[in-house]
Image (cartoon, rainbow, N blue to C red):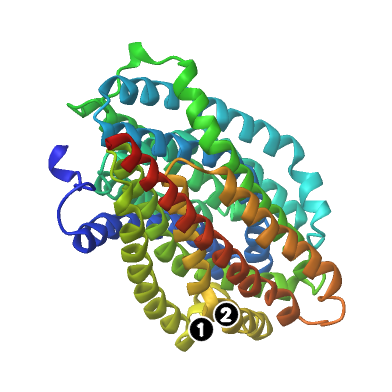
Amino acid sequence: MAKRNIDMLDGPLLSNVIRYTVPIILTSILQLLFNAADLVVVGRFCGSNSVGAVGATGSVAHLLVNLFNGIGIGAGVVVAQAVGAGDRHRIGRTIHTAIPLSVLCGTVVAVIGIFFTPQLLEWMNTPKEFIDLSILYLRIYLIGMIPGMIYNFGAAILRAAGDTKSPLYFLTFSGVVNVGLNVLFVTKFHMDVAGVATATAISQLVSCVLVLWALMRRQDACRLEWRRLRFHIRPMQQMLRLGIPTGLQSGMFSISNLIIQSSINAFGPIAVAGNAAAGNIEGFFYNIMYAFSQTSMNFAGQNVGAGRPHRVMPIFRACTACMMTAGAIVCAFGLIFARPLLSIYITDSAAAIDYGVSRMYLVTATYVICGMMDVAGGTIRGTGSSLPPMLVSVVGVCLFRVVWIYTVSPVWQSLMGVFAAYPISWGLTFITLYIILRKRTARLCRVKKGASL
């Protein structure tokens, strides 16, 4: 396992950032293939209503999952700082608290989601043409939340230790399982959206088993032993302190996206289908850039834990430069090939493709701003502070979008008027987060310098 770990404390920073991030990018793309495979299969074999039914659940699923995934991110930061400090005792207690905590989080998500799915979808004005299909899809999908949450926590631990390749291998295998089962359940058993949801739940179970197996095979302080699983108070407090603000931030993002989705729903099922397909394509581009946020968070975490806060800003700059380069390439590709890409998802509605193109021309073209915002926020979390990014993001992104939807959108009565809320909110939030990052890093350096005198 040690050979797979990237050294985050020493060596050439830029090349280590790239080597660390590439597997995360590939893993994120494979993870997105879970939902993309759902959309493509139902789009080609079941029609645009099924595409809309699956796409309409995305915001609800993200809201429920992201509220608790933040705690997994907090676990990763705690492990990263402990690894940087060489504190084997703290690493062990954190890992053996994180796994049972992930089971608890997954259970809560599944129970809440299954019981409240119909009401949430109705609040979003989900078109009546496919609301029943959306309810069926989401309920089956949420059954897989416990293994899905275990995988997310386990993968965060592996990445914090420097291993980004194992999650990639696991998602490769489970992604193949997901795609194969999608085709089988839809084309042979004619299960429609229930088939793709079942395939996703099974693939999440596969990835869960693999990540637990990897942790059990490790020979370092990150080794998982079943007999040691329990809730240790102090590590759990640290995970919650870092993770709850992150989860709340993600939840608020999802709530603002729910409001935007409800505005899109008002334009009818064709607009919903086009938006769902475009949003799924953009998800690939976004996750390529977001991977550098995870890199900056773990690199900053290990270096702060090792008492090297002076490396935080160089880490931020290296990750931002790489993100902007990757983002410019993939977003340009998306804009050039917007129609062919959308045609993969939608085969029976040229109007839905037109709606998707309209979204991509505004949102995809400005995604790099979102990447800058995420890298800044991730770096701040890596230093051990997650409350300021949450507060800034809630105001700069979530509150701004809500105000926009209820003030500007009614005047600018088009989908472009809805989508414009995205880039403006990203830019305002990035500027504020960058100022906070500079000040926090300077303070950590002063504290370190004072301690060494």
| Residue hosting label 2 | 360
Left or right: residue 412 versus residue 189 is right
Which residue is found at the position 25% from the left and 62% from the top? 18
- Residue 384 spot, x, y in % from top left: 45, 40
User: Badge 2, how many Cα within 10 Å: few under 14, some, many 20+?
Assistant: many
> Which numbered mark, 1 or 2, is in the foreground of this view?
2
At which x and y percent is residue 234? 47, 19
Residue 183 visible at all: no
Residue designated by label 1: 338
Location of residue 90 in the rendering, given as x and y in whole percent from the top left corner: 34, 23
Front one among 236 and 182: 236
The residue sitting at the top extreme is: 227
Q: Which of the image's four quarters has the C terminus?
A: top left
Horizontal and vertical percent position of residue 150: 44, 33
Given contact means CB atoms under 8 Å apart, are the residues at marks 1 and 2 in contact?
Answer: yes
Q: What is the C-alpha distance between the residues marked 1 and 2? A: 7 Å
Q: Secondary structure at mark 2?
A: helix
